[in-house]
C-alpha cells in the first residue's frame, strides 16, 4: 500500500479544479488545501492545539533547518517529528534544496550535492539527495520531498536545462535511497524555469518514475503572477490526474484561487505568518496594516466575516496596541487570524468546486479583496 494516496471526488466542468481527499498515515486531508509552514518544528507563535482549532490538517517542516538544529538524530531519538513537536496530523518536509540554493555565494553545487556554510555558525556542511532522504526518514514525515535545484529567476535556457536535468538525476537517487515507502511518500519536483519546452521535458522525466505525488517548483521566485499562471497552464496538465499536485511556496489568496482553477491540490507559503508578524492582516476586503494609526480607536474585529479566535474576541485597537508595545500576544493573534483566513478561503474554494461555481467565486472574491481580474 502507498503511504499517501489521492482520491479525486469531483472535477469541475468549467475549470481544471478538482475536489479530493488525500489519505496519509496521520489522517485524511481535504483538497485543495493550504499547508501552514512550521519551518523549525513549529508554526511560529502557535501551538499544535491552536492549529487544530483553525482546522489545519497538514503542516510543512524544513529539512535544512532541522538538520542544522537540533539535528535529525536527536529528533529520531525523540520518536520522530510528530512526537517531538506533539503534532498528530500530517507533516510534509521539504528537502532543504530551496534553502541551500538561496544561500548564494555560501554554497557550491556539484553533481554529488551541495556544499554550503551553515547560516548559524559558518561551519561547512554538505547535503546530497541521499543525505536529504536520510534526514527526512529520521524525521518521519508523511510526505518527503525530493532534493532538487530550485532554478533562479531569471536564468538562461542553458542554465535552466542543466539545472532541471540535474534535478531529475537527483530524484532517481532520492527514490533509490528511500527505504520507508510504506510509511513515507516521495514527491518529485518539476523544474525548468520559465521555459515551456524544459517544463514539459522535466514533467515527462519526473512522472516516468511513477511516484505517489508531484510538485511544481521554481515558481513564485520573482516572476510576475501572469508568468506563473502561464507556466501552470502548460505544466499541470502534464501531471497524472490520479496523483496529488503541489505548487510550492505559493500562498496569496489570489494565487490559491488561480492555482486551484488550474488543477493544483496543495499549497504552502510563509506569507500569512510572516506578514502577521509585521502587523498586516488578510481580510475579506483586502490587507489591513493594523499597526497604522487609523485603527487606534477601532473596536471592531480584524474581519467581521471571520470566525477565528482572534476575530471573536479582540478588536483592531487592542491588537494594534499589542503590536506597538511589542507584545508577543499580538503576533499570536495576528497569526491565528491570517492562517484561519486562508484555511477558510480553501474551504470556500472546495465548496465552490462542489457547486461548480468556482469562476463566479473568484470574481466575487477578487472584487471584494480589491484584486484586478
Image (cartoon, rainbow, N blue to C red):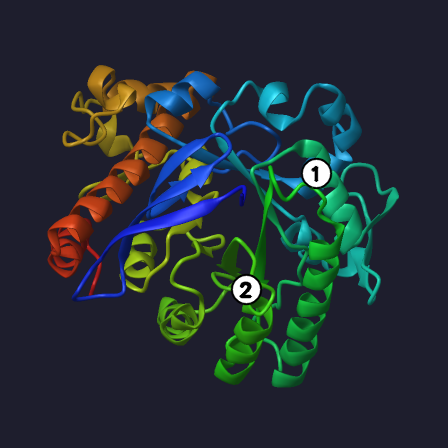
| Residue of label 2 | 218
Q: CA distance from mark 1 to mark 2?
A: 24 Å
Whole-percent x and y of residue 281?
31, 36
Which label sits in the foreground, 1 or 2? 1
Q: Name the secondary structure under disc 2.
A: loop
In which quadrant of the rendered image does the C terminus lie?
bottom left
| Nearer the observer, 64 or 333 | 64
Q: Are marks 1 and 2 in contact (CB under 8 Å)?
A: no
Could you tell which of marks 1 and 2 lies nearer the N-terminus?
1
Residue 148 sits in quarter? bottom right
Does 64 sit above or below residue 26? below
Does 14 sit above or below residue 82? below
Does 263 sit above or below residue 352? below
Residue drawn at the location 16% of the way across and 49% of the way down: 354
Whole-percent x and y of residue 307?
20, 25
Whole-percent x and y of residue 41?
60, 29
| Nearer the observer, 193 or 10 | 10
**Left or right of 88: which side holds 103?**
right
Q: Which residue occupies the extreme front position in the image? A: 1
Whole-percent x and y of residue 109?
80, 64
Q: Residues within 10 Å of mark 2 (few under 14, many from 20)?
A: many
**Left or right of 290: which side holds 297?**
left
Q: Name the secondary structure under disc 1.
A: helix
Residue drawn at the location 60% of the way across and 73% of the way down: 205
Residue 295 sits in quarter? top left
| Residue of label 1 | 137
Amino acid at each position: 500500500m502507498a503511504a499517501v494516496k489521492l482520491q479525486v471526488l469531483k472535477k469541475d466542468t468549467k475549470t481544471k479544479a478538482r475536489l479530493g481527499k488525500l489519505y496519509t498515515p496521520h489522517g485524511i486531508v481535504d483538497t485543495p488545501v493550504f499547508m501552514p509552514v512550521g519551518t523549525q518544528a513549529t508554526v511560529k507563535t502557535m501551538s499544535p492545539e491552536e492549529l487544530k482549532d483553525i482546522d489545519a490538517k497538514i503542516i510543512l517542516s524544513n529539512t535544512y533547518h532541522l538538520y542544522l538544529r537540533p539535528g535529525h538524530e536527536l529528533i529520531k531519538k525523540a520518536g520522530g517529528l510528530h512526537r517531538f513537536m506533539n503534532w498528530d496530523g500530517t507533516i510534509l518536509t521539504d528537502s532543504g534544496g530551496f534553502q541551500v540554493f538561496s544561500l548564494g555565494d555560501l554554497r557550491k553545487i556539484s553533481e554529488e550535492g551541495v556544499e554550503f556554510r551553515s547560516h548559524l555558525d559558518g561551519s561547512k556542511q554538505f547535503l546530497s539527495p541521499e543525505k536529504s532522504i536520510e534526514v527526512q526518514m529520521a524525521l518521519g514525515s508523511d510526505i518527503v520531498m525530493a532534493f532538487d535545484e530550485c532554478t533562479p529567476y531569471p536564468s538562461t535556457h542553458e542554465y535552466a536545462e542543466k539545472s532541471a536535468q540535474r534535478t531529475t538525476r537527483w530524484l532517481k537517487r532520492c527514490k533509490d535511497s528511500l527505504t520507508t515507502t510504506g510509511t513515507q511518500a516521495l514527491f518529485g519536483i518539476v523544474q525548468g524555469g520559465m521555459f515551456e519546452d524544459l517544463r514539459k521535458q522535466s514533467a515527462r522525466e519526473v512522472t516516468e518514475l511513477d511516484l505517489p505525488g508531484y510538485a511544481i517548483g521554481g515558481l513564485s521566485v520573482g516572476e510576475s503572477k501572469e508568468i506563473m499562471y502561464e507556466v501552470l497552464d502548460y505544466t499541470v496538465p502534464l501531471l497524472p490526474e490520479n496523483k496529488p499536485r503541489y505548487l510550492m511556496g505559493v500562498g496569496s489568496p489570489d494565487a490559491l484561487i488561480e492555482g486551484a482553477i488550474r488543477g493544483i491540490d496543495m499549497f504552502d507559503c510563509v506569507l500569512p505568518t510572516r506578514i502577521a508578524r509585521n502587523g498586516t492582516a488578510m481580510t475579506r476586503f483586502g490587507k489591513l496594516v493594523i499597526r497604522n494609526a487609523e485603527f487606534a480607536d477601532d473596536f471592531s474585529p480584524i474581519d467581521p466575516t471571520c470566525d477565528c479566535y482572534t476575530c471573536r474576541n479582540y478588536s483592531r485597537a487592542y491588537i494594534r496596541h499589542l503590536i506597538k508595545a511589542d507584545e508577543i500576544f499580538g503576533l499570536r493573534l495576528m497569526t491565528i487570524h491570517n492562517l484561519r483566513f486562508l484555511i477558510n478561503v480553501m474551504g470556500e474554494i472546495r465548496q465552490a468546486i462542489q457547486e461548480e461555481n468556482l469562476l463566479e467565486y473568484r470574481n466575487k472574491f477578487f472584487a471584494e479583496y480589491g484584486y484586478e481580474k
